[in-house]
Image (tube, rainbow, N blue to C red):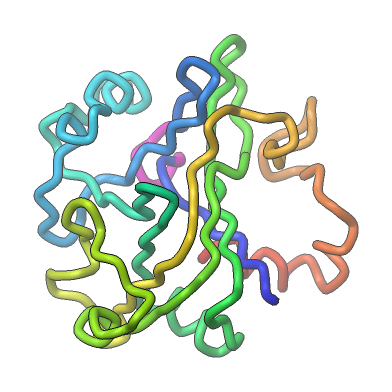
Amino acid sequence: MKIVFSRKGFDTKFGGGASPIIGGKPVSLPIPAGNGETTTYRERGLADAVALASRGRISGEHACHDDPMFADGYCWLGQVNAAQGHLRNQGVDTGDVFLFFGLFADPETGARHHRIFGFMRVACRGAPAEIAEHPDWRAPPRHHPHLSGQWHHNNAIWHGEGQAASYASDALRLTANGERRWSRWAVPEWLMANRPEYAKAWFDL
């Protein structure tokens, strides 16, 4: 089984801020839309959160890239271009696990840190037209952005059991206490058994 660390959601490049922790729960803000998506932050119930995280640059009426998507114990993830190519080259397939992490702000101090906010165990994956015929495929509860639009030919949907974190557990925090978000992570030693730059490539998927 392979474990893929996949960075998603708001950060200093996409969105311009950190996702919030609201009522003890990490709320990963989808990045702003970039391929004709129509789902808005307000429709996702994130209007106030995105306005605060972006310092007013993004409002609830802006469209968002609603991905990864979680519902009813399942997850839907879109991958394309270099990220999808890297997954293919590394042989990531059914039975493997994605751990989604992102940049979050401490609700009391505002300090930014990386933490895991969700996971998916892959049951099926493929191009939108192909995956709909897979016996393990379940249609998402709302439109997923990678199911339409002008994407590169290797656009793929990954689907399986998955869930978003229900609270901001210390066990899911990646950045070590007192460290800057990328300078040092509190992770098992086996994670960095290979060269650090190799591990970093996985984190950028």
47 with respect to 29 (left or right)? left
Count the labels in the image. 0
Residue 79 image position (x, y, % from top left) = 38, 71
Above or below 94: residue 62: above
Residue in the foreground of this view, choosing between 179 and 159: 159
Quarter of the image for residue 149 reads bottom left
Quarter of the image for residue 62 reads top left
- Identify which residue is drawn at 18% across, 27% down: 59
Figure quadrant of the N terminus:
bottom right
Question: Magenta span covers which residues?
Answer: 11-17
Above or below 19: residue 154: below
Residue 146 image position (x, y, % from top left) = 24, 67
Q: Main secondary structure of the magenta part?
A: loop
- Identify which residue is drawn at 74% across, 36% down: 171
Above or below 3: residue 95: below
Residue in the foreground of this view, choosing between 125 and 152: 125
50 with respect to 142 (left or right)? right
Above or below 85: residue 123: above
158 magenta-colored: no
146 with respect to 125 (left or right)? left
- Identify which residue is drawn at 37% across, 47% down: 72
Residue 44 image position (x, y, % from top left) = 22, 35
- Identify which residue is drawn at 29% across, 81% down: 131
- Find the residue positioned furthest to the top: 108
Residue 104 image position (x, y, % from top left) = 53, 32
